[in-house]
Image (tube, coloured by chain):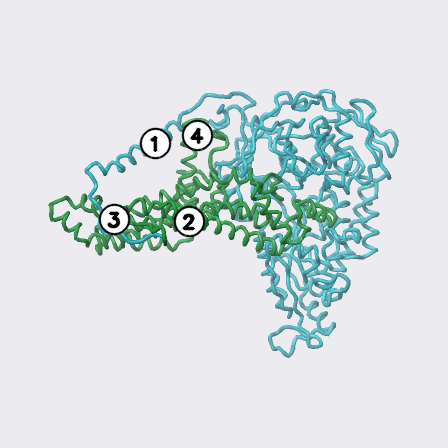
Amino acid sequence: MTSWLVRRFAASIAIVFAVVTLTFVLIHLAHGTPFLPTGDRPLSPEVIARLRAQFGLDRPLPVQYVKYVAALLRGQLGESFALRRPVSDALADAIPHTVTLAGAGLFVDFLVGLALGVYQAARSRRFADVALGNVSLFFNSMPTFWLGLVLLLVFAQRLHWFPVGGVGDPVLCPTVSSARCLADRLWHLALPALTLGIVGAAGTARFQRAAMLEVVGQDYVRTARAKGLAERRVVLVHALRNALLPVISLLGLALPFLLTGAVLVEWVFAWPGMGRLTVNAILQRDYPVVTATALAASVMVVLGNLAADTLYAVADPRIRIRSDA
Amino acid sequence: MLRGMPTVAPALPPGSERPARGLVTLCLMLLALAGAGCARRGGCTGEYCGTVVFVTTPEPDILLPPSSQLVVSRDIADQIFLKLADLGMSGNTVGDTDFQPQLAERWEWANPLTLVFHLDPRARWQDGRPVTSADVAFTFDIYTDSVINSSARSALRRISAVTTRDSLTVVFRFRTRYPEMFYDAVYHMRVLPSHLMGTVPREQWRSAAFGRAPVGDGPYRFVRWKAGESLELAADSTFFLGRPHIRRLIWRFTPDLQVAVTQIVAGDADAIEVLGTPDNARRARAAPRLVTYPYPGSTYGFLGFNLRANGDTTEPHPLFGDRALRRALAMAVDREALLRSVFGDLAKVPPGPMPPQWWIWDSEIRDLPFDTVQAARQLTRLGWQASGAGGDGIREKDGRQLAFRILVPTTSAIRRQYARLLQQQFRRIGADVQLDEVEFSVFNERMQAGRFDAVLNSVDADPTPSSSISQDWTQAGIGLSNFVRYANPAFDRLAEQASDALQRDAAKRLWRRAFEILNDDAPAIFLFALDNVAAVDRRVQGVVIRPDSHWALVRLWRIPADQLTERDRAER
């Protein structure tokens, strides 16, 4: 197990390094200038030349890359061209918001998805199963961006049940200083998390339904029924645990989708996370921020997958990890 | 590597259904917390309690006036830093009669080239230090430093020196005499604290830590800036020009304009400076809690023809190098119809390169008419035949089609809409137009390098034509903001004379003649000049919006005590 973990960890570092390299090269090769006019007047060619020299952009790309990697190894991510602050500060502000949103989205995704999947499997081929199957297909096919706008329009603007974007009320709760402000944060989190989670939940439900149907036909489930256990107990206790194992793999796969989905959801809900930071950085050709967000996202995805694989092994003691594999 | 798949699982003990109960408990706890959120708090009462939340799409880059050009940075910095004097509501930039004292309590002209300001002795930095003439001299030094590269640097080129006579007297010396001397001396610079910024190396001003937690001398002091979320200022109750009524100003950052408008309609924000589209204006007007405030805009948009070859500025453009062809294309565009289709009543067709805000706006300025018959006749006369070999209705001349591309930024829905409508209008007279829709950074790069045929551009102009026009449309601006590389010495001469005219009537006549020359040359088709509409919550009284600086007069706004909401009163 330890040797497997070490190898997986080494592979993860290689993946992260490849992502950073690819992002660095692609964003530098993309057309466009990082020093945009920020007001009504463009910067003069002399000023642009000075800024390029100041940030080392006048050097050949391989030299820039070597310098970047050397700085990265020293834990330095550089300074943002557009934000006028260290990239590490910008990331430190954004990552907690994205982790919160992705975590909440994952919670909604699996809570709703598992519940629906189990319910559908228990009522397989009945009206409820067919109806819920179609509804989940509808949500699964829906772009998160559009769903977010609809939820905003209905639940925030029309019904006033939720706030229109943001992570908190800047007037009453600029910081989480009390239980009231924690509740305010959760209230603000509800719609974006639902948007992010519901689309994923529809897919999880279909996956879970199939897994449950496979399991309920197994001998041990028939045995449980033959022992006279209540159907609820048979499904929730005996069948569900085994049907959950394939879903753990889904957990690892869900992270990249949640992070990419978060980009759009963050935009719609004015959520100041990494997605919004990345989009702005790409549009402004803010090379250090683009590369750093790619680094952070790849680390999160790789760690998520590593956690899912480890969890899978832990969850099922019969799974053996071959040290010589 | 993982091997094997599970087939059997042991049964869970009876107590394993507890997670469901845990979930219910968690939900109850959240409900309790939310209930606590509904609890009313006591708080501020009286005349100085209001809170105004502004919603804005961009976030400031830095709150250090010489280092930022963003409008939102300027709007916020205007609450923190003072100028010597500020422009009045008339927008008159000529002479000094329409300016309001700020840091300078009075001023006099020692001679035609020397202006003396006397600082208000009550003025204080928010750390308690007095504002002195040394701060003003330091500020001038910063704004004119090539390393800092303030956008106002070129506007200050005619001021030769700023010196101190005593701690409260500062002297401006000018190189030449011109009508907007006073405007240049006071409008561009927000005075900075030399005792706090004097030791910061100039190379580090671009990202100085002070710019994320500034100490100013204005009506509001900085409280906090939560990146991506909001920025908060608090009223300085000791402000020497009068305590602001609104005690808290909060800027909320929302990247999407539609969402920003939804926030203000839903009551999550109190003010937005520009609604942008007719649909947004309709939504705001329909919201009972909002009052809309129309005001003249500072932006105009145009289709500019590159007078130099696409990608080679040494050669004339094969199509647009021909003045007669440009005129024919200009006459083929029904600008009024385009405007109605895109903006409804939120914009005007400009009679030249000017926003509605400028005092020289004159709808009588001669311009090319919309006349497709004359346009077609002109094209035929130039040899562009409608019955080309292609048989697709596109005009041809010497085997070459009348075809060009328009460069448009994808970030502007308005300009993309315009581009499509123009494409249709040009198609009707036999011109094949394709669109190059590119990201804003690519758009700027190509525009600055001259790599385009035609460009749909918009200009956010200065409050006065003299600086804007020379940068955007005279030979002096080639290589800077004159992207179409228009050059006509007669126009340049008239623009210079207009800028130097000491009387407004004479200046207006000269500007009119200059613009008529420009319109005759048709280096661009001037499509729209925006009339802005702001929306502010009805409980906020005394709202006055100055066109050149939307929130410059916020310190005079107030919320009557009987209209304060819980959010206004809340103490934190």
Residue B108 at x, y percent in the picture: 83, 28
Question: What colour is chain B?
Answer: cyan
Q: Is residue A197 left or right of residue B320?
A: left
Instruction: Estimate the x, y position of residue B106 in percent, counting from the top left.
Output: 78, 25
Q: Which residue is mark 1?
A: B31
**What x and y, as percent, mark residue B375?**
69, 67
The chain to which mark 4 is attached is: A
Badge 3: chain ID: A
Q: Earlier in the sequence, mark 3 or mark 2?
A: 2
Which numbered disc flags the more N-terminal residue, 4 or 3? 4
Dot 1, how many residues are within 10 Å of its Cα: few (below 14), some (14-19), or many (20+)? few
Residue contact between numbered discs 4 and 3, judged by CB atoms under 8 Å: no
* Picture residue at 62% right of the left edge, 34% below the top: B76
Q: Which mark is residue A225?
A: none
Q: Which residue is mark 2?
A: A8
Check disc 4 and report the residue beneath it. A181
Could you say which chain is coloured green in the image?
A
**Relative to A6, is B172 above or below?**
above
Could you tell me the amino acid type at mark 3?
A: Asn
Q: Secondary structure at mark 3?
A: helix
Q: Which residue is mark 3?
A: A242
Q: Residue furthest bottom?
A: B389
Q: Are marks 4 and 2 on the same chain?
A: yes
Query: Are labels 4 and 1 on one chain?
Result: no
Kind of residue at badge 2: Arg
Badge 4 amino acid: Cys
